[in-house]
Amino acid sequence: MTTFASLEDALKHFFGYDTFRPGQKKIIEAALQNKDLLTIMPTGGGKSLCFQLPALLRKGITIVVSPLIALMQDQVDALQDNGISATYLNSTLEYEARRSRQIAILKNQVKLLYVAPERLLNERFSLFLDRVHRDVGISTIAIDEAHCVSEWGHDFRPEYRKLKLLRQRYPKIPLQALTATATKRVQQDIVRQLDLRSPDIHLASFDRPNLHYEVQPKDRHVYHKLLRAIRAETGAGIVYCLSRRSVEEVATRLCHDGIDALPYHAGLSDRERSSNQTSFLRDDVRVIVATIAFGMGINKPDVRFVFHYDLPRSLESFYQESGRAGRDGEPSKSILFFGLGDRRKIEFLIEQKSNQDERKIALQQLRQVIDYGSGNDCRRKIILSYFGERYRGNCGKCDNCLNPKPIEDWTIEAQKFLSCVARCQEKFGINHIVDVLIGSRKQKIYQYGHHLLSTYGIGKGRTADEWRMLGRSLVHQGLVGQTTDGYSILKLNKHSWEIFRNQQRVEIAVDKHQTKTTANYNPRKAEAELLFEKLRKLRKQIADANSLAPYMIFADSSLRLMAQVRPKTLADFANLSGVNEYKAQQYGDRFISAILEFGEQHKLPISIPSKSQMATLQLHQQGLSVVEIAQKRGFAVGTINSHLSQLIEMNQPVALNKLVKADKQQAIIQTIEQVGDLPLKTIKDALGEDYSYDEIRLVRGWWRSQRQSVLDSQ
């Protein structure tokens, strides 16, 4: 077994990365000490590496329990593409394939074995595992998606409960439980159900700093908002819908409008779902439109956006689903289209539940989603507050931070609100407290005698909506607690008492006010984006030839680094983050050739595009029409067409065929060659009324670029 001077050296050797993500190294060091572990690390945090790297540094084999066939196959393919000996045993394998893999395992040729919990507990397989333990040695058992063990988790699976038998059968083998989300209650349940012994618990922050959170109003124009949002993004994305019918409708409309999209829901056959998922993973389609049936087995790290067309049922579901964007750490976007019409649909579904406690909890979860959608506070702060994590300050990235509402000091109002919570003996939620403050005459007020409290009616100077806004903000900022057992009862905490004692001010966003933000465009950055797209196409070609998902070849972050650094030798290429020696040998020559070819093509432009022209080019490359670019940039359509014609003349990659029909191009070129490169009006007079000045200007730019190329070659 190879030895390494440091864990960082091992990381670079096996996975190509120079540094660990936050928390990874500490977890790996604990794993190498053979401790039981519980790791809660959000999607995209790199929790898989926390059991994969230790597996490669210890004797024996690591058993990985994974709940979904697609997930285990995906991880094994990615490991094998890094030159790592990993395999899986599941129901998709024929007898001969299964037998050959078992032989390789017994010959100690495999370091990681992925299995489903059902197979792991099968008596016949247990006998095989006993032999592996005796002849090869099992270094650890890693239980991925460990929240499935708890009925308090968002994806409870009864078969996970039986995994406690592993501790009884192999008492000396350390267990490592991993999950992306788990409340305190779920964490305790995981430890108890798996019989973890004094486990090291590693709880990473739930913050996903690379995600931009945004909420847009859901109205009758919602589909067109969705379409514009997709066209404004690059890369792959997911659109979540509440129903199968909505999935089919949105997917069909997107295809009609030129977006490569496929549906995914439980009503499709297994074969069609699998085919659509594979097409998305391999970048054969750009967008998957799905119900929540599309989720936990999706290991695609380069999803650039997740849009919620309908309201999710809980904030935890929203966090999980939106978190499927940007798992690679690259900038990504989450948009929720928020409309209270969806609330009624979900409430109807909740009412169908026969268990009263389930209905109560589901309604509370729905209220938390509505609070997120209607909140004026930093979106990130609201999400992290749900998981019990206090976010100080504002993120500066979500829509509420980028388009801030006026901030006002509401300390006095907060003192009134919290005083009312105290006088109601911390037994009620926001709505009841608001009713007391505004002096409501509801029967419930009189029933509890709250019309006799000193706080009854002291808030008449504010509307009920304003008081509710304050209540939500106090919860989001962690200035008052709230129970999560289905009742959302307010509880005073240490920050509440600091407000009473005037030791802490309360500032809240109180109004809708939009401010315009403008992006800074950089020509050098724009050129790097063009090279990045070229490398993405090469990655796709290689992936298709090897029947792999493109991200298994290289992550987007590695491609972006290639586009910025532009390595010219294999040694330089191997030094890039995300490139190990194995991948440098496998793919290095082809990527270096593509980079050098790009450099030659962009070596001698006729002139250097301006920042404004490059801004237009970037949006054009994203697939926006001339009209959409003009609207987005606040320019006239004629100005955008002038930019595009000048870019064409500079040999920049503008898709002329998307701007001017081929037959018109030919006629314009013939006319220019006949009358000469004269003013536009002269050329238009020769062509007639069927041709616009913009069409002539664009084609003339192409004609001039071709003429210059001929002159340069002479």
Image (cartoon, helix red, strand yellow):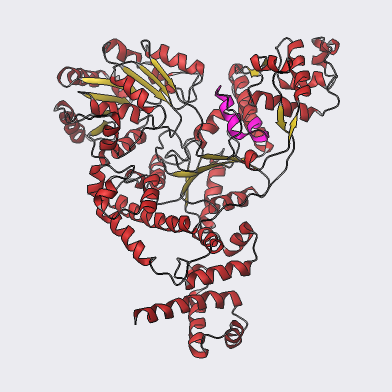
Residue 386 counted in the magenta span: yes
Farthest bottom residue in view: 674
Query: Is the residue 611 above or below the residue 510 in the image?
Result: below
Give whichever of 342, 398 is nearer the camera.
398
In the image, which residues are magenta?
A: 370-389
Q: Quadrant of residue 72?
A: top left
Query: Is the residue 169 above or below the residue 670 in the image?
Result: above
Asked if residue 313 shows in the view, the reply is no
Q: Main secondary structure of the magenta part?
A: helix
Indicate the position of residue 677 as horizontal and vertical percent values: 52, 85
Query: Is the residue 318 above or below the residue 118 in the image?
Result: below
Which residue is rendered at x = 69% and y = 14% of the image?
497
Asked if residue 144 shows in the view, the reply is yes
Indicate the position of residue 665 as horizontal and vertical percent values: 50, 78
Is residue 631 rendered to the left or right of residue 164?
A: right
Give whichever of 441, 212 is nearer the camera.
212
Indicate the position of residue 386 as horizontal and vertical percent values: 58, 25
Residue 40 counted in the magenta span: no
Is residue 18 rendered to the left or right of residue 412?
A: left
Query: Is the residue 257 above or below the residue 69 in the image?
Result: below
Give whichever of 473, 76 is nearer the camera.
473
Give whichever of 282, 241 is nearer the camera.
282
Indicate the position of residue 357 as horizontal and vertical percent values: 60, 17
Q: Quadrant of residue 566?
A: bottom left
Q: How many marks?
A: 0
Quadrant, the N terminus: top left
Q: Quadrant of residue 313?
A: top right
Quadrant, the C terminus: bottom left
